[in-house]
Image (cartoon, rainbow, N blue to C red):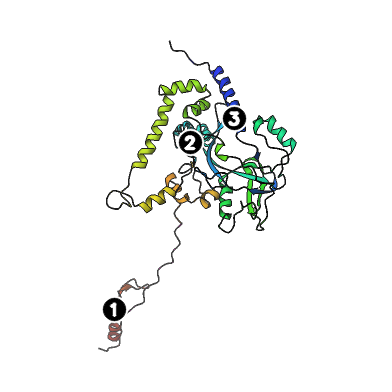
Amino acid sequence: MALKVDMNKAKRKAAEEAAKAAARANMTRTSRWKPAQGKNRIRIMPPWASSGPNAYQFWRELYVHWGVGPDEESSTALACPRLSQDGPKGPCPVCVEVERLKATKDPANVELAKELRAKQRSFSNIIDIEDPIWKQENIDELVASGADASNLPKVGTTKVQEFSYGPTILKQLLDFYTEEIDFTDLDAGHTVIITREGQGLKTDYRVILDTKQTKAPVKGEPKLQDLDKIMPFREPAEMLAILEGLDPGEVKALAASTSAAEEAVEEVVAEEEEAEAVEEDDGSNGEGEVPEDELEEAAAVQYPPCYGAECDPKDSVCNTDCQLFAECKTKCGIVDEPPKPKRQAAPKPAAAGKHAVATKSPATGKAVGGADDLIAQMKAAVGEK
């Protein structure tokens, strides 16, 4: 008789592993910065890497699954290896679970899928203009949070922090950045002003750029955080363990024997590869191949996780800022209501020409001929030929 896993024991172990993961994450970062209510003035630091997928960028883009796990105590955030810009593009058990929940059509499951689906986040090194130097109380807070004691900053040095933000702020920052305006320049850059208003889901952020060039508040060469080490990608078996609240070692053993969940992951990947391999006749060059310029254009389009699933014509952000709105609306099956027909005026009666068609007299109801017949009748009445 096959033995069953003790779920209580597995959940306790999963909570321990989640705590260890959080400790590991703290060891790879110095501090996180979050905008306070009102205006916040920051300097975004230059790129931290000269090689790799994030070389010469002031941001790192990730897609993150938040709150993964059977309960809040053991839940954690996981970087999506399939959707993230610098991910290994391998299978993602959390993405598979999201699709499974959506397929049930159950409202509770669909809502859970929305919460669990990967969401875009960006990370940058910044300095808070109002708090640019490390103080002893800041370092004490890092120690209390479990940060690596051997990698703590020194009192009085430049306080470089990690700023995590959404796609709206990233878009505004990229709009500001030009060849003439490099706000990351330490000697002649620009202050970024972020205004935060509201709480929770009703929080609103506005970003503006100080047009005056200023020197960043740094002492010597600032120590930038290696943002490539933030939220390292995990193996599918480990992700599955966290998702189901099981012991990672036990899940790896199940994966070795091809578990049902792993088969589902493989099936999704196979479907994606098959879809990518299909070539449509439209736009082909006559030899069954798509022209290179069209391939480059298609590759440049990045479809977000919500594509074709959550299109809302009444959402101003959805239909104004999203470049895929029209295409997404079609995929969702949303059809615009046809315009109401305008009331047309009654047609004017045609002017009687020399050979006008006969009509009825409104007085007698008898047919009246054209202009030639009417003249003939009048002449006959007076005895003329």
Left or right: 17 as drawn, with respect to 267: right
Q: Quadrant of residue 20?
A: top right
Residue 63 position, x and y percent, is: 52, 39
Q: Earlier in the sequence, mark 1 or mark 2?
A: 2
Q: Amino acid at mark 3?
A: Arg
Mark 1 touches mark 3? (CB < 8 Å): no
From which residue to which does the magenta span run?
Answer: 340-357
Q: Is residue 101 visible?
A: yes
Q: Which residue is mark 3?
A: 24
Q: Earlier in the sequence, mark 3 or mark 2?
A: 3
Which of discs 1 and 3 lies nearer the camera? The answer is 3
User: How far apart in space, not on screen, are marks 1 and 3 (Cα)?
Assistant: 97 Å
| Helix, strand or loop at mark 2 | loop
Q: Residue at 51% of width from left, 23% of height from top?
A: 248
Q: Which residue is mark 2?
A: 81
Mark 1 touches mark 2? (CB < 8 Å): no
Residue 126 position, x and y percent, is: 64, 45
User: How far apart in space, not on screen, are marks 3 and 2 (Cα)?
Assistant: 19 Å
Residue 56 position, x and y percent, is: 54, 48
